[in-house]
Structure formats: structure tokens, C-alpha cells
Amino acid sequence: MWVRSTLAYRASFVMTVLGGLLVTGLDFVAILLMFSQVDILGGYALPEVALLYGLSATSFGCAELAIGSASRLGARVRDGTLDTLLVRPAPVLAQVAADRFAPRRLARIVQGALVLGWALAAVDVRWTPVKVLLVPVMLVCGAVIFSAVCVAGAAFQFLARDAAEVQAAFTFGGQTLLQYPPTVFGKELVRGVTFLLPLAFVNWVPAAYLLGRTYPLGLPQGAAFASPLVAAVCCALAGLAWRAGLRSYRSTGS
């Protein structure tokens, strides 16, 4: 329904997507401006930073397209309209994801994919079959990890009810964090996004193998291939959090 309503005004949809491409592209313009003043950022050259940027932006764009509407769950909890989703013969999480589905979010995916394509062509990497396969694995696992964070944030809104900005701090904030090399951040922050909220497995850790660089925090070599396992664990934990939050829902009492 939401896709049909969006495409009913195709010129408006095209202009919205183009505007989204322009706005999201400003993030990478900021990186280009930095590299107009320096040649290396945290030991990484521009194509390597562009690779990190493209991986994080594309993965997050896919997650935002699929589950980004969950950030509005708090509003439904506050006004009691979540009740209408509970009585329908469909999973509540699927309905929350489909609520006000916004195809305009394709802009972030396209923009991230364009930067990623340029980075893959420009970066100095000795490509092997394993490295070639690792790129789509990173994108899929990154999207799953970001989606799990979105679901966990939505589950938190069952309790906080007005925590959309808190959720955004970990989703949009995490995506922005991953655009830059781990070497520019303090070790405590890197530990936090590696062991507590494992966003580092979206791109930092597997990209280190791809680029032949030292792993963050001296992780073992096999850590580059742990993204599928991390994504599965994140999904399991997010699912538990969602079930607990949904069971705690008591409507508005009106």
C-alpha cells in the first residue's frame, strides 16, 4: 500500500530520491574535503576510507529500508495504536517494518553503492576468490547487524516510549562512526563497538583482512570471517528483546 501510494506521484518520488542522493552524498563530500588537506587519515588513504564508507552506508541503507520504520514504534506505544497491529493475522514485527514503508530510502543504498564501486576499483588489493566473496558477505551481514540493532532499539521503546533519538544514536550514529578508520578513535570506543555493540564486524574487522591491515585490538585472523556468526547472535538477542518488549506491552489503559 505504501509503495503504491509513493509511486502514485512518480515525479515527486524521483525528486525525493534525487534529493536524498544529494543529502546523503554530503557525508562523503565531507570526507573528500578532509582529504583535500591531508593524504592519510589514521593511516588510511582515500580509497580505503571510501571502502569503509561504502560498506557501512550500503549495509545501513538496506537495513533502514527494511526495518527503519521501527523507529516510530514509541509513538504507537504512547497512543495505543499498536493494538491494531496485535489483532491482525500477521507478525507484529513485519507490520511495524511495513508501516509507512519509504522507497525513498533507496537513495542511501544507491549513493553508498556508487562510492563502494569506486572504492573497489581504486583500492590497492590483491584480489583472491576469498576476498571477492567477502565483499557481498560483509554487505549482507552488515545489513543484518544494523537491522538487529534497529529491532533491539524498537524493543527498548516498549519501556522508554520516547526513545527514537536513543535508537538513532546507535543506528545513524553507528553508521557514521564506521565511515572512518578505527585508528582515529580511542581504544575504549573501539572495544565498545567490537565486544558490546559489535558494529565493528560490519566493516572494520573484515575490511582489515581485505586491505591487509592489522586487525582492531589485535583480534585473531579468523575474526574477519566471524561476521555471519556475529550477525546470527545479534538477531537472536534482538529477537529475545523484541519478544520481551512485546509481552510487556499493556496498551494505554484507555
Image: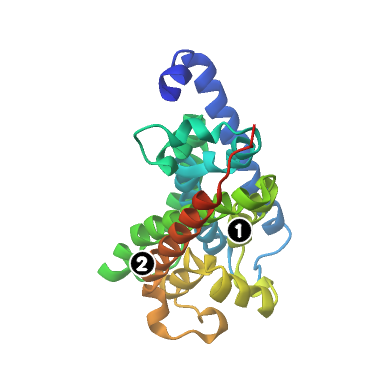
Provide the residue designation for mark 2.
Answer: 228
At 62% from the left and 49% from the top, the residue drawn is 157
The residue nearer to you, when weighing 210 against 245, is 245
Residue 98 locus on image (x, y percent):
44, 34
Answer with mark 2 or mark 1, whichever residue precedes in sequence: 1
Q: Give the left or right position of residue 13, taking residue 37 as reference.
A: left
Label 2 crowd bin: few (<14), some (14–19), many (20+), radius 10 Å: some
Relative depth, front residue between 164 and 38: 164
Q: Amino acid at mark 1?
A: Gly
Q: Secondary structure at mark 1?
A: helix
Q: Is residue 182 above or below residue 29?
A: below
Q: Amino acid at mark 2?
A: Pro
Q: Quadrant of residue 3?
A: top left
Q: Residue at x 51, y 34 (%)?
A: 83
Q: Which residue is mark 1?
A: 174
Res 94 visible = yes
> Residue 57: where, in percent of width, then height?
52, 50
Left of 184 or right of it: where is 52?
left
Decide: is 248 above or below 240: above
Q: Which mark is residue 79?
A: none
Q: Tell me: residue 232, above or below residue 215.
A: above
- 108 relative position to 177: left or right: left
Circle 1 packing at 10 Å, graded few (<14), some (14-19), many (20+), is some
Find the residue positioned furthest to the front. 253
